[in-house]
Image (spheres, helix red, strand yellow):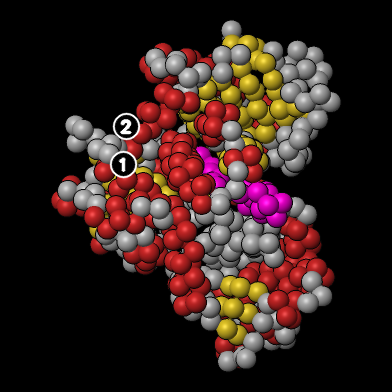
Amino acid sequence: MENGLESTGDSRLDQAVTQWLQYDKNPKTAAAVRTMVKDRAMSELQKCFGARMEFGTAGLRAAMGPGVSCMNDLTIIQTTQGFCAYLEQCFTDLKQRGVVIGFDARAHPPSGGSSKRFACLAASVLISRGVPVCLFSDITPTPYVVYWANGAQIIPPHDKGIAAAIEQNLEPWPKSWDTDGALQSSLLNDPYQDIHREYCQTIQQHCFHRELNKNTKVKVVHTSVHGVGHIFVQAAFKAFDLQPPYAVEEQKDPDPEFPTVKYPNPEEGEGVLMLSFALADKEGATVILANDPDADRLAIAEKQERSQWRVFSGNELGALLGWWIFQCWKQQKEDGKASIKDVYMLSSTVSSKILRAIAVKEGFHFEETLTGFKWMGNRAKELMDQGKTVLFAFEEAIGYMCSPAVLDKDGVSAAAIAGEFVSYLASKNRTLSHQLRSIYEEYGYHISKNSYFICHDQDTIKRLFERLRNYAGENSYPKECRGFAITAVRDLTTGYDSNQPDNKAVLPTSKSSQMITFTFANGGVATMRTSGTEPKIKYYTELCAAPGNSDLNLLKTELDNLVDVIVEHFYQPEKNNLTPRPE
């Protein structure tokens, strides 16, 4: 092998390592690769050079470290070169438009990688081609995600176009590594202060009870879980004239090591919120708002009458925030707002159908999209371009778009709107739990149960789903599951939908991922799908009861029974050697 290193004995690996060392100018990652070769650490080398991390609609997702499978200086340069080349194909006026780049606080000292370093390298690549760059000078929410000219995340076919362009631009361009030159360039601009100010002004359009906010006695705790949310949520509360929330001191500053939590994801529930509970108990706060480290998602917990804490699910918060935002719109509609026939709310296919129930009764439109805010953001933009009003969109994974000014989930505006909501409820001597019960009593209980199995064998996953597609003979889906009658099937892998006159699904389909939804005669809905980023087969189940059916225990028992038979007969975990979700 070149570079004075012995061969690994694997010609493909030798070639990948040689090319890497020719291109990589980061001394830490280059040294790490040389050490692996010298020590003949074959499993580590295979892990680092086995497969290039994939660029998809959600951008890049991988650990930081050396090699093509990780996030590092070289792979960021290569990715941005591909992105830039693709933009040059799509926009003849790219040098007038420019590109906006933000970064968060994550870092990996052993490889010299950090979000800020990657942002500077990306800026360097673009500036080397004469493209103006707006590079934020301080941390902002969200990771390596690409937003298109419409302000929403990219959707196909852009992901494939960018991925192909990356493969064609792997060798670093002459000035791609020149971050010093880029940071001195006249093409570089810092939008941080202007955007921060304009964002706080824009979200005030969703503040409807300023006097109540000024005088509220409700105390709120906020945690950013060692991420970027603290300063933004404090500013958003100020924009709404709300008292600043108590910040969890140990978690308010960005820290890429996330030292106080096992998993820095508020979706995990109580385990992430222990310090928040302690601070709330100390200060007499009754509501906790928790952002994930990117600050694009929001969890909420509320103290109950017996002093225990209730952590709301993403679907419950979708019901609460959707109801509240609609009530605020109704209050304002006399002031020249759009008529209700032009009002829309959105959610993903695996999220609660509660917005559909509210829409049916209230008269606005509800639409489902595929999973992910890339779909909801793009659909919202299409609707707004047609003169429609998009009030709200959500997904069950605690993601909420409460303001269409940001065509993505945004935990900051959601936190401020939630702060005003609890202040309003307190003025009526009510709580979030009271209000949620009222929503379900008026529009019908919607109770959900979501989980997953772990499976590393792609053949097993394919066999499991193909069995469901050929359940009682070729191309025949199940008609029932142990006594639960199935009334409709939608398969977004094959494009089949029994609810459509031509049996063709309306939503986009993808053969690269598995996703089947069963609708049951009892009001149950169950979606089985694979994860795009993890070795999981997920299920999302919901029982949608008619208004007036308020025997919650009976409904929960029925949903539990439905989930049990789906797991036993559709997943067959023992036969397929599936590992249940860890407790």
Horizontal side of 338 relative to 306 (left or right) equals right
Residue 337: x and y, percent? Answer: 56, 50
Which of the 4 image quarters holds residue 34? Answer: bottom right
| Residue 160 numbered mark, or none | none
* Disc 1 target residue: 425
Bin the neighbour count of mark 1 within 10 Å (Cα to Cα): few under 14, some 14-19, many 20 and up: some
Write down the region rendered in magenta: 376-399
What SS does tag 1 mark?
Answer: helix
Residue 517: x and y, percent? Answer: 65, 27
Along the line of sight, which residue is nearer the eye, 65 or 567?
567
- For the N terminus, give its image quadrant: bottom right
Q: Is residue 80 visible?
A: yes
- For the C terminus, give its image quadrant: top left
Relative vertical location of residue 168 with respect to residue 529 in this rendering, above or below: below
Horizontal side of 215 relative to 363 (left or right) equals left
Bin the neighbour count of mark 2 within 10 Å (Cα to Cα): few under 14, some 14-19, many 20 and up: few
Residue 275: x and y, percent? Answer: 25, 51
What SS does tag 2 mark?
Answer: helix
Along the line of sight, which residue is nearer the eye, 27 or 358?
358
Q: Looking at numbered disc 2 in the image, what kind of residue is underneath it?
A: His
Of the image marks 1 and 2, the number of the one nearer the N terminus: 1
- The number of numbered badges drawn on the structure is 2
Relative vertical location of residue 130 with respect to residue 122 in this rendering, above or below: below
| Residue 434 numbered mark, or none | 2
Say if mark 1 contacts mark 2, CB within 8 Å: yes
What residue is rendered at 33% in x and 34% in y?
433
Q: Nearer the viewer, mark 1 or mark 2?
A: 1
Which of the 4 image quarters holds residue 169? Answer: bottom right
What residue is rendered at 59% in x and 33% in y?
363
Along the line of sight, which residue is nearer the eye, 8 or 161?
161
Tell whether position 368 is magenta: no
What residue is rendered at 49% in x and 70% in y?
198
